[in-house]
Image (tube, helix red, strand yellow):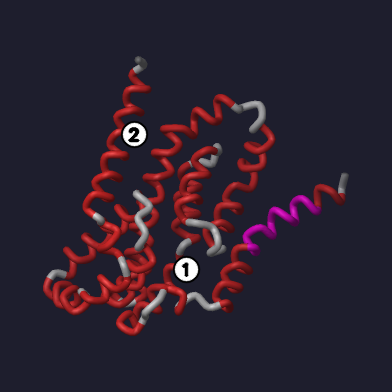
Amino acid sequence: MKKSSLKKLVLIFLILSILIFIKYLDIFHFFTLENIKSQREFLLEYIQDEYITSVISFIFIYIFVTAFSIPGATVLTLLGGFLFLPLFATIYVNIGATIGASLIFLAARYLIGNWVQQKYSERLAAFNREIEKHGKNYLLTLRLIPIFPFFLVNLLPAMTKIPFKTFFWTTSLGIIPGTFVYAYAGRQFGSINSINEIFSIKIFVAFTLLGLMTLVPVVLKRFKKEAFT
């Protein structure tokens, strides 16, 4: 067996082991709205005594939740807004979510992304040229429009030739609006009974329009190209 294949098998084994561990301990239960709301007074007191430790712990928990696609990131963002105030929570969530998403991206590219590109290089040639030109616009659109699952936007780009640095900065920038909305809503954390109470149709439309605006340069380039050919 090749050394690279052995490394991939070890990584897969580690990931599966952690996922089984998460399932066995029922970690999903800890990140429900009801459970975290019941702990909010304790968390507030702890933060007053250990602010730096709390921030570091919050970021690491967010990385873990994002990296393993554990349901609860939205609840954590609400909690962050309640505990740290919206602006600071947005920064902390952005750090955690960006690092967590990057870990998924790198793992997926290492395990299967490079293989996909090698095996289907000819079929993907035109697609790769498009991604090379406008990949950053597409990624920003996917991040800004809230209908695309976060974990899919972490995985699928890994199958393309999008540079990691492009994935990193578009993720960090693209999640800011949605993060701030939830962090701001988190000020009323105690009175929130459902995530659906926060995301109104107006906010959804605003994010969708913002996402579509990132595609304007792509559309204009194609329009000019067709106009002069």
Kindly identify which numbered label has been placed on residue 227: none
Q: Tell me: residue 35, above or below residue 21.
A: below
- Label 2 or label 1, whichever lies nearer to me, is 2
Residue 57 pos. (x, y %): 21, 60
Residue at x 35%, y 63% (from the top left corner): 72
* Relative height, residue 217 to residue 18 (above, below): below
The amino acid type found where label 2 is placed reads Ile
Image quarter of the C terminus: top right
Q: Is residue 214 magenta?
A: yes
Q: Is residue 34 magenta?
A: no
Q: Is residue 31 above or below residue 82?
A: above
The residue at the point 31 percent across, 39 percent down is: 16
What residue sits 54% from the left and 30% below the top?
116
Helix, strand or loop: magenta stretch: helix
**Horizontally, is 6 left or right of 209 in the view?**
left
Q: Which residues are magenta?
A: 212-223
Q: Quadrant of residue 210?
A: bottom right
* Residue under numbered circle 2: 12
Residue designated by label 1: 178
x, y (%) of residue 85? 31, 77
**Dot 1 amino acid type:** Gly
Q: Residue furthest top?
A: 1
Asked whether 123 or 176 is in front, the reply is 123
Image location (x, y in percent) of residue 212: 64, 63
Marks 2 and 1, how far apart at CA: 32 Å
Image coordinates of residue 70 in percent, x first then y, are: 35, 55
SS category of the residue bearing label 1:
helix
Name which quarter of the figure residue 17 lies in: top left
Q: Secondary structure at mark 2?
A: helix
The residue that appears at 35% across and 15% down in the rendered structure is 1
